[in-house]
Amino acid sequence: PFPPFVLRHVHRKKVTQFAGNQKAGKTIGKTLFEWGTYKIGHDQLWANGTLTQIYGNGTGGRQTEVFFECLDQYPTVTAIEEVRESELRMWVGASMFCDFRPTNPTPPLLEALLRPLEGWCANFTTTGFWSYEYCHPDSLVQFHKDSSGDVRDPMFLLGTLHKSTPSSTFMWKTHASADFPMLRGKGAGVNTNSRPKFRFLPVQLVDFPSELNRGREEKPQQVLAMELTNGTLCDSADVQRSTRVLFECPDDFATLATHQVMKVMETSPCHHELLIHTPLVCPHPRLLPPRPKEPQQVNCVPVESHQLDSPHVSEANHVKVTAGTAVDPGLEAIPSSYLPDGKISLNGSHFGMRQYKRSRSSRKSPAFRVGRLVRHRWSKYTAVVLSWDRSCEAPPDWTAKVYEHYPESSSHKPHYLLLVDQAAVREPQLPLFAYVPEVALEPAPAGQGLFRHPLTSYFFHHFSTHSLTSN
C-alpha cells in the first residue's frame, strides 16, 4: 500500500508524486519525486484502440507505463500498480479509447463520446439580434443583450432534456417568482465526477443537414445528433420550441484542443439546429472528416532498436485475421496429448512447459511477465501468463496450423503459456490452456472482476486488479 500522497499525471509531459492529504486529495508541500517525463516516439497503439505511453528518467531512474483504455465516463485514473520499487503502472479510462467500429460485437453507447463535455457551457452571439447559451447536454437558451451588455427579457428555452413540468425547473435559477430560465454562465462547470448525470441521451448518427452545408466544398460522412425538446411555447405555431444539436468532427481535429460553436439557425418554425465542432466525436469512424485530396506531409522519427522488436509496429499490421473478426478461441489451445491428466506439467518439452532459466532482456521484452492479466486481441478472452518462451516452442503440426493466421516472423518472438479465464460462459467453450504469440495479446482492461480457473490457486496465491501473485 502507498503512503498518503497525490500522483499528478500531465498528459504527454510528466508524472509527479506529491505529499498529500488522503481524504482531501490535495497536495501539501513540495514534490516528493518524479515518476518520469514523457518519452516521445514510444507510444504503442493496440488493436482495440487503447494506447500505452512511457514516462522515463524520473527521480532515481523511476519510470511509469500509462495505459489508456475504454471507459464510459469523464477521463479518470482507474488504477495504479507499483510493479517494483522504481516502476509504476497507471490506468486511465476515457471514452475516446473505446472501439466504435461496427465490427465490435459489444460496441459502447454513442453518448459515451460526449461524456467529457457534460457540464460545459458556451455563450455566443450571432450577427443578428439574439444571443445564446448552450449547456451540455440539457439546455439551449435564447436571449437579447442591450447596448450596455445587460440581458433583457424575454428569454426563451429552445430545448431541454427535461420534461415540461415543475420538476424540471431544478436546473434553472429563478428570478423572484417568475417561471423562466436564467443563464448559468460562470456557475457551470464540466462534470469531472466518475459517473455521468445523464447515462442515456437521445443521440443518433445522421447525415449532415443540407441547410448547414452552404458554402462548404465537402461535408463529413455523418454527424452525431441530439434532440432537445420541451422548450418555451412558440406562440406562432402553438408548439414548444425544440433544437437538434449536431456534433461534428472538424478537419483540424488533431490540433483542436477545445469545443467551438460554429452555427445556430432556425431551420423551420420554432425548430433550431446548433452545430458544434469537437474532437470528442472523432474516435467514431463514421464521424471522421473527408480525407484530404492533396498529398499530406508525413513527419518521420528514427526508429530505436526496441521499437523494431515490438510486434505492434510490424507483425500486428500483417496478421491475416482482421481486427474485430471472430476467431476460434481454440486455435491456440494446447492439445490434450501434452497435458498429462488434463493439467499443466512444468517438466514438459513444448508450450512454455520446458524447464530452463528464463530472464527478461529488458522491461519491454517479453512484454508480459508471469502473473500478468492479458486479453486476446481477437478472441477477446482474458487470461493470466503462467510461463513464456523467447520464441515458439511447439510441435510442427501445431505451429503450421496456428501460423496460417499469423506472419511467420511472429514465431521468432515471445510466446506465452496462458491459463484462460473460465468466469464467462462462451460458445464455443474456451480452452483451459493456450499458447499464444505476443502479437495476439494486449493488456487486460482495468477493473477485472472474478477470474476463474481450476488451477488458479495451485499456481497463484493473490489476485490484484491487473495481475496474480505466483506461489
Image (tube, helix red, strand yellow):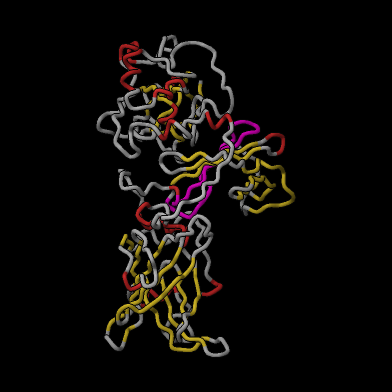
Q: Measured from the top left, where is residue 380 in percent x and y?
A: 35, 35
Q: Nearer the viewer, residue 209 or 104?
A: 209
Q: Measured from the top left, where is residue 184 in percent x and y?
A: 50, 75
User: Residue placed at 49% from the left, 36% from the top?
Assistant: 465
- Where is the N terminus found, in terms of image quarters? top right
User: Residue placed at 62% from the left, 54% from the top?
Assistant: 24
Location of residue 3 with respect to 259 vertically, above or below: above
Q: Measured from the top left, where is residue 318 in percent x and y?
A: 39, 32
The span picked out in magenta is: 72-96
Residue at the far right in the pictured view = 30
Q: Nearer the viewer, residue 48 or 227?
A: 48
Residue 146 shows in the view: yes
Q: Mainly helix, strand or loop, the magenta region?
A: strand
Q: Nearer the viewer, residue 362 or 409?
A: 409
Location of residue 12 with respect to 440 vertically, above or below: below
In this rendering, position of residue 1 left or right of residue 295: right
Residue 162 shows in the view: no
Location of residue 357 with respect to 178 vertically, above or below: above
Q: Measured from the top left, where is residue 152 in percent x and y?
A: 49, 89
In this rendering, position of residue 1 left or right of residue 291: right
